[in-house]
Image: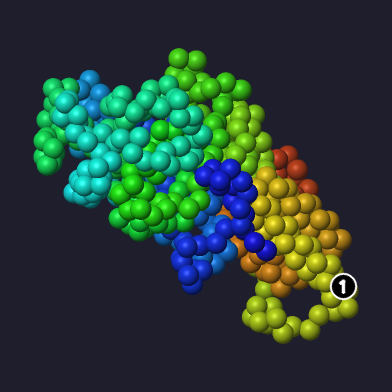
Amino acid sequence: MSLKFFNTLTHRLEEFHPLDPAGKRVGIYTCGPTVYDFAHIGNFRAFTFEDLARRYLACKGYDVVHVMNITDVEDKIIRKVRETREPLQQLTGRYTAAFLDDCRALNLLPPHHVPRATDHIPEMLALIGALMDKGVAYQAPDKSVYFSIAKFARYGQLKKIDADQMRPGERVKLDEYEKESLGDFALWKAWDEADGDIGWDSPWGRGRPGWHIECSAMSMKYLGESFDLHCGGEDLVFPHHEDEIAQSEAATGKQFARVWLHCAYLLVNGQKMSKRSGNFFTLRDLFAKGYTGRELRYTLIAEHYRRQLNFTFEGVDAARASLARIDEFLMKLQDIAKHATPADANAVRPLTTESVIELTQQNALTSRVKTAFEKALDDDLNISSALGALFDFIRDTNKVLSEGVLLSSPRAAMEILDTWRRFDTVLGFGMPQAQEAPADIAALADLRLAARKAKDFKRADQIRDELKAKGWVIEDTPKGPKLKKL
Ligand SMILES: [Zn+2]
């Protein structure tokens, strides 16, 4: 089966082939956070979809090299430094650490390289120098260096731009701007008083880099002048990614990133998230409401990345219920697999006719879900369809389990768990960990069992309540009572 992505550059669904002639290595660059505040859930939707893309490529057998930058000098950061008087490095260091903590809570795989912009000023200066040498950049009377969009004929590859909208020669110094102010953009911003003590020396005087040049310099340093995938939220298409393409391709004469993936906005209760509307959430806000990173990962990942995700608390509750269903299923299998003997593991134990029939049925289900999972994700990471296939599989396997024989077939349970572990390398939800009850809790459970045997149900119920108060519930199963952490 072949993997297809919707490429923003060509506006179509395309079969994915790595640039590597051996077809093995895949380079991905994802625009990282601007570290002046805690990242919000809209930001994390993009990071989570990028993690899914990376994990799926690895699952398909590619050697993925993932680079995510940290933007630690930029207009918004400078503004915050000015407002708070906190030194730049202290401020960005604090928010970088918080961001990486949040990524861990969402089980995002750490990128192979996490370059910081302020550690790559020489690379940026070299790139600006190359653009000056080619005559596509110039120093304006305000001493800043600008990219001349009129000198780059292919400007407007991601975002279709009418030539009459372009205002070559008009300059925009801001890192973020609207299409209406489509003019020459800043590569190097000359120092002014508002920058305080933030600045680096350059052949064009003291100043700081523009945001766009940061990503061009860092992506090409770690992935080469041309690489496979560049990802981000759709808010980055213009001007950030458009300008990255212009600078990089004008400097190297080569195609920059071959495939561009952009994820759609996240809405909260159907509205654009904003601090003013009171519907703005960081991950930390949601942890404080009792949600876990795992539940939020599920919520952020479960909708196809090119569809708008409407974040609601009902949605997170539904994610919690879905995960509970998965966990219950896997714990049931773990329980059966626990009784496996070495012969089961090596698959040499003779099987009865009944279990052969049931295993054949189960094998057919397992092979069907493997195909459906891969087919869905091959189709531009259609995760909603992949999850649908997994829940069908859970339903059908539960039916086989309820019919009996599989309950005593540890080998089959182990095989299903192995298949699920492979799915989970992509999903990143984690396998449920059976929690062993501590000795005092186990002793109480034994007392309750003894009370029940003695038909002292009042005492048994008291002990059950006592266990509940300590955070444990007892479930009476055909195999005897089982303790579960609340
Ligand atoms: Zn970027």
Foreground pick, 181 / 62: 181
Residue 126 x/y as whole percent:
21, 49
Determine the residue positioned at 45% across, 14% down: 276
Looking at the rendering, in which quadrant would you find the N terminus?
A: bottom right
Foreground pick, 48 / 236: 236
Residue 369 lies left or right of residue 145; in this view the side is right
* Amino acid type, residue under disc 1 in the picture: Ile
Foreground pick, 213 / 235: 213
The residue carrying mark 1 is: 357
Residue 48 x/y as whole percent:
51, 44
Determine the residue positioned at 30% across, 27% down: 169
Q: Point out the residue furthest to the top here.
A: 276
Looking at the rendering, in which quadrant would you find the C terminus?
A: top right
Where is 357 relative to 469, above or below?
A: below
**Mark 1, secondary structure of its residue:** helix
Where is 471 relative to 184, above or below?
A: below
Residue 307 lies left or right of residue 409; in this view the side is left
Residue 201 x/y as whole percent:
11, 40
Residue 128 lies left or right of residue 354; in this view the side is left
